[in-house]
Image: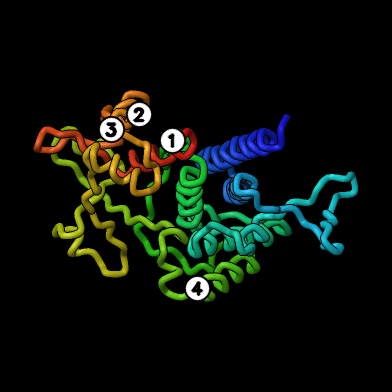
């Protein structure tokens, strides 16, 4: 096997294992019969992110093994059994080649530190308290997985909102330090980490993804089919909300005609990409099927494509120029 094929093979295996770890993490967290959710989720997502970054480094020929320099030679660190010692997740985040943005890294560093704390002491009741950060970690992972290795690898089609058998408490949660059963070292760690962030970093959805749920009474058949309802930011309901809560603003997705997609790809350096090539990709991925979410028909009776389609075309051209 040639060196390039060996690199591609290891990279592919790392991506596969990374996805499996992430899916296992979410499936365990959504399992109502599990009582060790948060701990399992943190460990598995740590593995998922580590393998994802290792795959990125290998694809970009970045050395991610520990070594010492002896003149011009590298002396690699090895385990007692002779295996190479690869970077852990925190080392990956600290390197100069780290491709992860600051807020996503804040989320991961929080979970890494929390893992260090729970390794030494059993805990409970942190699932609900930290679910916003777990959700952010999952969404961030899916975004970077697709960005690094193509949108077709996204795990969103394998996941959905989990069903809850308990109602959402309308009373304000108790203060973190007063949570029954929450070890003081865990509570102290969470509060200290949050205090180390500025207001923008703490509020960033890549650090903690918080959604406001509003109880709804349906008056007509068919209205109560969804547990979660999104309201427009300028609606009377949204305007009346307490300003402490976040409102998700509805924005119009950017739309592109086929000719605009072709021009965009040419501007990015794919000079030989033609309208015929675009038509072939449309057929290959069934891009005009509404179920795939790549675009929509607008009033002028022409099909327009979303940014999601442009990302797939870009990934396809990068792989098969």
Q: Image check: 219 left or right of 38?
A: left
> Residue 12's image quarter?
top right
Res 281 label? 2
Which element carries disc 4, helix, strand or loop? loop
Which element carries disc 1, helix, strand or loop? helix
Which element carries disc 3, helix, strand or loop? helix
Q: Residue at x 83, y 54 (%)?
A: 76
232 or 296: nearer the eye?
296
Q: Image check: 239 left or right of 269?
A: left
Q: Badge 1 is on which residue?
A: 316
* Whole-number angstrom distance, CA of label 3 to CA of label 1: 15 Å
Work out which quarter of the rendered image holds the N terminus and state it: top right
For marks 4 and 2, the one nearer the N-term is 4
Q: Badge 4 is on which residue?
A: 197
Callout 4–callout 2 Cβ contact below 8 Å? no
Q: Badge 3 is on which residue?
A: 275
């Amino acid at each position: 096997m040639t060196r390039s094929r060996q690199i591609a093979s290891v990279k592919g295996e790392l991506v596969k294992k990374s996805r499996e770890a992430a899916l296992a993490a979410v499936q365990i967290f959504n399992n109502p019969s599990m009582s060790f959710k948060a701990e399992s989720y943190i460990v598995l997502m740590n593995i998922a992110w580590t393998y994802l970054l290792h795959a990125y480094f290998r694809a970009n020929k970045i050395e991610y093994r520990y070594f010492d320099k002896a003149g011009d030679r590298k002396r690699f660190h090895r385990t007692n059994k002779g295996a190479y010692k690869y970077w852990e997740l925190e080392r990956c985040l600290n390197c100069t080649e780290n491709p992860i943005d600051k807020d996503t890294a804040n989320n991961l560093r929080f979970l890494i530190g929390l893992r260090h704390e729970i390794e030494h002491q059993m805990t409970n009741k942190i699932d609900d308290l930290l679910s916003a950060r777990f959700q952010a970690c999952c969404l961030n992972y899916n975004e970077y997985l697709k960005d690094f290795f193509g949108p077709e690898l996204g795990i969103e089609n394998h996941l959905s909102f989990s069903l809850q058998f308990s109602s959402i408490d309308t009373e304000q949660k108790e203060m973190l330090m007063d949570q029954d059963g929450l070890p003081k070292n865990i509570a102290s760690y969470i509060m200290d980490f949050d205090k180390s962030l500025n207001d923008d970093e703490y509020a960033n959805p890549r650090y903690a993804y918080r959604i406001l749920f509003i109880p709804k009474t349906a008056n007509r058949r068919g209205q109560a089919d969804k547990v979660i309802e999104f309201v427009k930011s300028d609606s009377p309901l949204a305007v009346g909300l307490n300003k402490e809560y976040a409102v998700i603003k509805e924005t119009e997705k950017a739309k592109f005609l086929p000719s605009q997609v072709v021009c965009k790809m040419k501007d990015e350096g794919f000079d030989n990409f033609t309208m015929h090539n675009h038509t072939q990709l449309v057929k290959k991925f069934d891009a005009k099927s509404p179920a795939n979410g790549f675009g929509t028909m607008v009033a002028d009776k022409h099909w327009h494509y979303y940014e999601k389609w442009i990302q797939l075309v870009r990934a396809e051209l990068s792989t098969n120029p």
